[in-house]
Amino acid sequence: MTSKQRVNTAMKMKSPDRVPVMCQISIGHYFLHSGVNPMDIWYSAEGFAEALVNLQRRYDFDGILVNLPGRDPNYEKQIDRIDRHDGENIVRWKNGNYTVVPAADNPHYYMKDGSRYFPTFEEIQPEELFYVEPWDISDITYPYTWGFEKEARPFDEFFPPYHSDTIKAVMARVGDTVSVHSEVFSPWSQFMELLNYENALMAIVDDPGKSQACLERLTEGAVDLGKRQAACGVDAILISSAFAGSGLISRKHYEDFVLPYEGRIVKEIQEEFPIPVYTHTCGSIGDRLDLMMATGTNGIDTLDPPPLGTVDLEEAKRVLGGKTFIKGNIDPVHTLLFGNLSEVKEDVRKRISIGMPGGGYILSSACSVAPQTPTENIEVLVPLAKEFGTY
């Protein structure tokens, strides 16, 4: 089987030739280990595509997740200068604001006074929302604009032409050999990012009706984006729903502010494009696997084990087996970041022995591979999958 066939078979909850391997990698890990300049990774669709493919080939992964949007090819026209300070690039923009680009972490965009902009819940009008991209190069604005554009785009042409450039560049490099997945942010994640977390959590208590109206609008944009990505030919779409675990919201809040909107995304994309749509939620989700399945999701990603999360893989396999594919459960901190090779081997053997039977399992770190994770701990995953995970 090719890597693409291997992952796609597992996503259909069937048994491929062996357990596929596909980890999500942090931006900082790409900065350190892909061989591509961090500035090119963050600001160039071609640069990020090169980094994605370089590490997929280095680690022999069966799939690639494209989790940054394409970038404006003319962004450099907005740069005043680039300074270096303590190993970081400081991009000074012509509008007076600046971006700190660390050597091994996500860049952040700051206003000229050093603050970050977030609108208040009171000033937001739901009908002005469509989609919020937390990793746009000029951060979040309201009403939302892309990059350094002066005006908000109409909703029927909301996503700029370059938005899918990274997906297209990756697919051009890997052809039909590797499973390529794209990402849309859950309406709940968009809402949290827009209001800076605490304010969003207060909003659903203070004004649940307006909060739900915002989520309805953000669902429209996520569906539109997902369909555009599917039209590019991706093999699957990941709904990034990082803030939906029990460490942040209750089961009741999940039912009210997450489930119906993610359910719409899955349903409406698949009405037009019959590809898997699956869910990434990190942290404590052991108490809500049933609610996650109720969205109609085709798969659940991360499955963080204790102490990072609350997912016991045996229990998850019992609840989810034959209903959704499952991906993850290797502890990215205690095993991959701080473990030695023998500890990695034992952890992987255990995960495969539980997840493999009956198919539908993709071996992966529970959440992203951390920037400083030793490369040898990642390079060993596919050989271990071949050793322990052959059907």
Image (tube, rainbow, N blue to C red):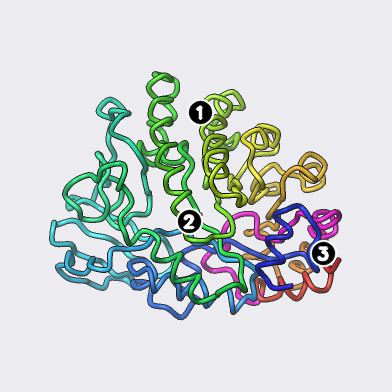
For the residues labelled 2 and 1, the Cα–Cα distance comes to: 28 Å
For label 1, the residue is 257
- The dominant secondary structure in magenta is loop
**Kind of residue sitting beneath label 2:** Ala
Tell me the quarter of the picture where residue 357 sits.
bottom right
Q: Is residue 312 left or right of residue 101?
A: right
For the residues labelled 2 and 3, the Cα–Cα distance comes to: 37 Å
**Kind of residue sitting beneath label 3:** Arg
Say what secondary structure mark 1 lies in.
Answer: helix
Q: Residue at x 36, y 44 (%)?
A: 132
| Marking on residue 231 | 2
Q: Please check the rendered image and state whether residue 362 is part of the magenta-colored stretch, yes or no.
A: yes
Earlier sequence position, callout 2 versus callout 3: 2
User: Residue 15 placed where, x, y %?
Assistant: 81, 60
Q: Is residue 226 left or right of residue 250?
A: left
The boundaries of the magenta stretch are: 350-376
Q: Nearer the viewer, mark 2 or mark 3?
A: 2
User: Residue 249 placed where, x, y %?
Assistant: 55, 30
In the depicted view, which residue is nearer to us: 86 or 158? 158
User: Residue 305 placed where, x, y %?
Assistant: 70, 49
In the depicted view, which residue is nearer to us: 7 or 43? 7
In the depicted view, which residue is nearer to us: 76 or 369? 76
Say what secondary structure mark 3 lies in.
Answer: helix
Q: Residue at x 35, y 39 (%)?
A: 130
Q: How many discs mark residues in the rendered view?
A: 3
User: Residue 319 placed where, x, y %?
Assistant: 79, 39
Q: Residue at x 74, y 67 (%)?
A: 344
Q: Is residue 225 above or below residue 339?
A: above
Q: Residue at x 44, y 43 (%)?
A: 222
Say what secondary structure mark 2 lies in.
Answer: helix
**Kind of residue sitting beneath label 1:** Phe
For label 3, the residue is 349
